[in-house]
Image (cartoon, grey):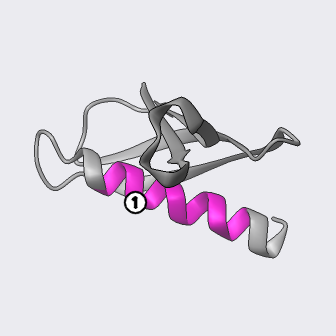
Amino acid sequence: MLAVTIDVIDDRDETQRRTVAAMRISRTSGPYAICAYEIGAVEDDDGFVTATSCVVEIRGRDDVWSVVENACRAIQSVERDGI
């Protein structure tokens, strides 16, 4: 599982750090070149929750950025299109 947290730090003051979004990405298929992932994301103070899934082609052993990129796109698509 990958855990992604987005924090905002106002005026570069660490004491003002606040989390604005968090995402959990869990692989639901085996370690193959193309993997399926379940994604859950929480945004803003209202606790808006989005859940979806996506399929990602893994280009290399540690291609974590492709997984995160595709998860972000899947979440954006759900939020934009409501599907």
Q: Is residue 55 above or below residue 64?
A: below
- In the visual, does 46 lie left or right of 21? right
Residue 20, image x, y percentages: 65, 45
Instruction: Pick whichever, 24 or 22, lies toward us.
Output: 22
Image point (44%, 60%), residue name: 70
Residue 74, image x, y percentages: 58, 61
Instruction: Pick whichever, 61 or 65, lies toward us.
Output: 65
Q: In the rendered structure, which segment of residues is drawn in magenta?
A: 66-78
Tell me if residue 20 can be seen: yes
Kind of residue sitting beneath label 1: Glu
Q: Residues within 10 Å of mark 1 (few under 14, many from 20)?
A: few
Residue 76, image x, y percentages: 64, 66
- In the visual, does 80 lie left or right of 6? right
Kindly identify which residue carries mark 1.
69
Task: Please state, as top left, top right, bottom left or bottom right, where the N terminus lies in the image.
Answer: top left
Image point (82%, 41%), residue name: 45
Q: Secondary structure at mark 1?
A: helix
